[in-house]
Each structure stands twice: as structure tokens, then as C-alpha cells.
Amino acid sequence: MSKPLLEINNLRIRFTRDGKILTPVRSVSLRVSDGERVAIVGESGCGKSLTAMSITRLSPTDMAMVDGEILWRGQPLLGISQRELQKIRGRQISYVFQDPTASLNPVMRVYRQVTETMQGVDKAEKIRHTADILAKVGLPDPMRAALAYPCELSGGQQQRVMMSMALAANPELLVADEPTTALDVTTQKQVLDLMDRLADERGMALLLITHNLGLVAGRMERVYVMYAGEIVESGPVSEVLTSPRHPYTRGLLAAVPLLDAPPDRPLQDIPGTVPSPDAWPEGCVFAPRCPYADDHCRQCHPELRCGNNRECRCHKEIF
Ligand code: SF4
């Protein structure tokens, strides 16, 4: 059997803050196969981005202590040199982040940013090359966009520029971290459709990080639901969306606005907020927000139980 493209086993990320050790990611395991579309879903502060960034050691601080195993085609990534990692980051794994405005250099024209790594090529060729790439991601008037400064483009156009930069090396895996959160709803759909099309054309795997469970329906194949630094549920998207087993997944689903919902149906929310890593409760971390919590839940941390291609971290089998 061929090895998965990406395999993460028992990933744990710790930081030291004010003399205390915090563990915002604990024991996360997931896998992405060649060409597979996988999503990690959860509210802000659940450790999704940290997990994704740790794949190529993009953690926001050098102080992070990372344990576990991250395998790329069976080869360990933890412990290899930054130089080797940079090669993988450039050629095999690319990232698109949430806010293109913050990722693009505001004082450099787009073509200079897209062709930053091209050596021995004159300006006219760089502009032509950039316009070609931008045309492939559906930017209207790509020549004008190639010569523009980022502030002259809309948010959706800037995100297309980011996507073209991420795809320039023809990566095997695109990690898209909340790629549409900063965009309006119509542009969100266009960018997600574009991502789908490019992944199809290239046979590229996708790892989508999002807080919106509604975005994964019909687009992704497998979903991992994360809460407070751990996976609480996973499985094929079609099954998790139609028969969620964990109360947190059910809460996220109920919070997705539906166009065909009766106008008097109130939008559901999950009471409370994700606790910060220095205030995680004993037992089940979701217990303070869970309508089914009992004393056993509050005292005993549930294991991730697996079966039939699904995983669920909950003491109760009623779901
Ligand atoms: S273990 Fe208990 S508190 Fe935690 S999600 Fe399940 S029912 Fe809720």
C-alpha cells in the first residue's frame, strides 16, 4: 500500500508563557492522501492553524516545542534542516493564508512579488510570465494586474494573486488557512471554486482550515473537527455532516446559516467560548459548553474512539 502524502501522528505543540507550559495542540493525528481534499474545522483558538503551520515549521514562535511525528511520503519532517524544509515548502507544500493584504508587500508591484525567485530574466519577461499565471487563476486584465500595486486590486483579486504564487511551483499539497475569511460572500465562492478547479486540474491534495463547517459540504472528502487542541471527531464529510456524533460538531452544524431555513428559525450558537490553553478544564474540555455533560464528563478525559472510518471523542454513545 502506498504511503499517505502527509501523515501526522500524536502531534503536540507546547509553549512556555510566564513560566507556565501551555499545550495549544495535544495529540493530533491526521492524514492526507494523494489528491485528497481534507478539512480541519473548529472555532478560532482550537489549534487548527498551529497544526497546519507546524507541518513545515511555520509556527509563530521559535519557542514552540513540537513532539510527535510529521511524515511526508513516509519521511519524517520534524528534525530535518531548515534548508531541506524550505525546499519542501517551496516545491511540494504551498500555503495560502487568510489575509492577502497582510501577505503581499504593499510597495512592490505584483509581477515583482510573483517572480521574486526567477533569476536571469528581464523585466518584460517577468511581466509576461506573471500575466500568464494570473490569467490561469481567472484574473481579468492580467497584464494590468501584473503591473499593479496590491492596493490597486480588490481583496478577491489579491487572494487570486496569492493563490497563483502558491501554485507556481506545482505543489502536491495546498494548505489553505481560512483563505476566504477576509472576502465578501460572492468572492468567497469564486475563490473556493477556483481552488477546486485548480486542484482537479493538477491532481493536487488540499488541506483546508476553516471555522465554517458549511464550506466543506460538497467540496471536501474528509473532515477533522478540532476543539481545544484536539481532534474530537473525524470522518467522511458526507457522513459527518449528515450524522454528526460529537456535540461540538452538532453545535457547529446548527450554527451554519441556511438559505432555505424558515425566517423565524433563530440562528443557533454554542454557548460560551473556547477556553484558552491555560484554562482548559479537567475531564472533557467541551464539558462547560456541552448540553449533555455530567459528572463523569467533567472528571474523565474521553479517548478518541475509532470505528468504521469514523472517530469521536465523547463518553456517550447516544449520537
Ligand atoms: S464527553 Fe460528555 S461533555 Fe464531552 S462532549 Fe461528550 S457528552 Fe459532552
Image (tube, rainbow, N blue to C red):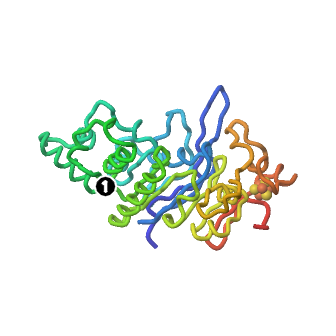
Q: Quadrant of ligand 1?
A: bottom right
Rendered view: 58 above or below 171: above
The spot of residue 72 in percent (x, y) is 43, 57
Rendered view: 2 above or below 146: below
Between residue 52 and residue 264, name the one nearer to us: 264
Between residue 12 and residue 198, name the one nearer to us: 198
Q: Is residue 127 left or right of residue 194?
A: left
The spot of residue 131 in percent (x, y) is 21, 49
Between residue 84 and residue 137, name the one nearer to us: 137
Q: Is residue 246 left or right of residue 171?
A: right
x 67%, y 62%: residue: 262
Q: Outermost residue, front direction?
A: 263
Q: Secondary structure at mark 1?
A: loop
The quadrant in which residue 102 appears is: top left
x 31%, y 37%: residue: 152
Q: Outermost residue, top direction?
A: 18
Q: Is residue 79 left or right of residue 20?
A: left
Q: Amino acid at mark 1?
A: Val
Q: Is mark 1 within 8 Å of ligand 1?
A: no
* Residue topped by disc 1: 137
